[in-house]
Image (cartoon, rainbow, N blue to C red):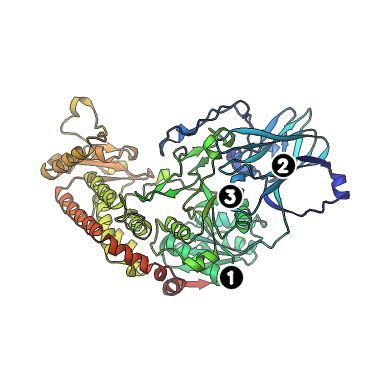
Amino acid sequence: MSVTENLESTTAAPQSREWRTLQRVILPEQSQMDTAPLYMDTGSAMGVQLPTLGTPHTMRDAKSSQGATAPTKEVHVEDFLSRYSTSVRAGERVSFGTYFNAFPASYWRRWTTVDNVRLSVSTSGSGAVIVYKSNARGALQRVDSVRVDGDAVSNFDLSLKPFGDGGWYWFDLVAGSESLVLKDAEWCSEGEARTPGSITLEITTLNKTDFCINNLRLLAQNPQALKHVKELILVDQGTQKVADADGFAEVAQALAGKLRIIDQDNLGGSGGFARGMYESVKNGSDYALLMDDDVVVEPESIIRLLTFADLCKTPTIVGGHMFDLYNRTVLHTFGEVVNPYTFQPDLPSEEMTLGHDFVGSNLRHTGWLHRRVDVDYNGWWMCMIPTKIIREIGLSLPVFIKWDDAEYGLRAKAAGYPTVSMPGAAVWHVSWIDKDDLVGWQAYFHARNRMIAALIHSPYEFGGKVVRQSHAYDVKHLVSMQYATAQGRNMALRDLLAGPDQLHSLLPSKLPEIRSMMNGYTDSQFSSDPDSYPAPKMDKPPKHGHGVSSPSYVGLLPWAAKTVIRQLSIPVSTSSKERPQANIAHQDNRWWRMSQYDSAVVSNAEGTGASWYKRDPKQLRKLMAESTKLHAAVLKDWQKLSAQYKNALNEITSIQTWEKTFEAHSEKSEN
């Protein structure tokens, strides 16, 4: 049901019903026009055939999920009048069925106490307001419409009952013979006004001063976003201190006493985010909002996360999504779960993809975006955790980096507290595409922390596939001449077998130890100068002029065995010790290709340098034997190790234990 009123009658006869704002329609800053498709859609969704759910996709093929798209009209900067107001040109149509402005009805229906919503649209000029909804399959349905003229407020009362498995509400504006101005619009729910919960917003940083100053300035310019932030804490673990950066004094003053800096030794993301949890409990906040340093935040997201969390049926972890900082319309993922058998991050349904670009296929054109996604965890690039949950299940695992967010989500879920990845709340973060954290110093933390999380949470007697798969990863690294990475992974298993009691003591010391170890391997020593290595030369050309192709699944095991035997038995050619056989781009650095070389210069993921990989049968034999021995020990003692880590969990994640670590490795300073 819709109602349209002019502004005079609304003022003369105020409504007796009380409404609270759930979500405001927002628009991009004029300096951020590359993000406009996330806020407003100028294309037509009429007659678009959405992709059929069930179409097979691979996680790495983002394009496979794109539906047919309609041509879009050019977005004009001058049409955006403010963060809440825009002008629709005469005879044109725009839609707010977009990531930031459609209303994610299925999430509100599933997780909150809200049963009905009101869309209130304030306009000036002549035209029409048309309301749409979708279902879980992505089918679009017209709900209602009104014609408007002059200054008007159009109200639409809408039920959330049809949104059991998915679906959104949104509205379009159609201008008549003259322009139609959207003055503001919001989605509301009926109910008594309540005092919103209080937030401690915590940012963990390591030498990212420019990002931090930019985000602090952005937050200072949006006082509404900080209205219910009790304290903004910056845990600075770097050597380049944010407090010493240009512009800090100005932005600290603008934050009106809400900012506090905590200088802390580098305890990793785990130590930084645990500090944010700890401080939020100590200062009496209702929520800890954890945020990465190398992000650009949409400030309205803070308000949306808080509003949603306040209305949840039970204490709920609510997180924002991550968009690519350097390709700002690309969404990393719509939600993640942990596959219990492989114990790897996974997508909740096969229709979803990584790296979805809203320019190629906006919300109204992409069927799988309409199905509600239930997740196991949300990345701590932006994640709000009720302090009630923190008090009950503790702080982060003391694991430096990797798997701390996933493990915490699984731990909360086991205690009966869900996690929601909330559409319409997001940050822009440096993309994973330009990183390869499975190779190098981070490989230690990937290997160890994944195994720790599996020991605590795997439902399988021996961890499902996790041990066997971990050993296979070692084989791939070794035949690829990535000996430093393999050594780091062996160190990870040795520390895993040593038990959970040492985890806190390893926080400040393990990274320097790993970096020192890696200095002894050429595959971890990078040069930014392409001419620093000899020109590549092969003693023999490739057979029949063809390169190496990936082995088939059926022939994988015999092929791998043959490759390992060849690398162990055939001596390294003299010429390959003096010069590489090839230059390999990062995207071509695959184990089945690298296993065919005696040496090669390989680019890193960032494109900033390259290292010289050199085959060494002695290293291969030593590291392979150790890896096999360690994995056999983990598998043999899985149940005993699982009991150890489960029994220690409450102690190593407790506020009291973390407090001792913080006292030993930090110094507070008030700002």
For marks 1 and 2, give the CA distance. 39 Å
User: What is the quadrant of residue 639 in the picture?
Assistant: bottom left
Q: For the N terminus, which image quadrant?
A: top right
Vertical relation: 659 (above or below) 357 = below
Q: Which mark is residue 533?
A: none
Q: Nearer the viewer, mark 1 or mark 2?
A: 1
Q: Which residue is mark 2?
A: 81
User: What is the quadrant of residue 310 in the picture?
Assistant: bottom right
For marks 3 and 1, give the CA distance. 28 Å
Amino acid type for the residue under numbered disc 1: Gly
Q: Which residue is mark 1?
A: 284
**Label 2: element kind:** loop
Q: Position of residue 56 (x, y in %)?
A: 42, 33
Residue at x 61%, y 49% (from the top left corner): 108
Residue at x 43%, y 62% (from the top left corner): 270
Q: Which residue is mark 3?
A: 110
For marks 2 and 3, give the CA distance. 35 Å
Q: Position of residue 60 (x, y in %)?
A: 41, 38
- Of 547 and 129, which appears nearest the observer? 129
For the image, the number of numbered tags is 3
Decide if residue 316 is on the left or right side of residue 228: left
Amino acid type for the residue under numbered disc 3: Arg
Vertical relation: 322 (above or below) 462 = above
Q: Are marks 1 and 2 in contact (CB under 8 Å)?
A: no
Q: Earlier in the sequence, mark 1 or mark 2?
A: 2
Residue at x 47%, y 53% (from the top left corner): 377
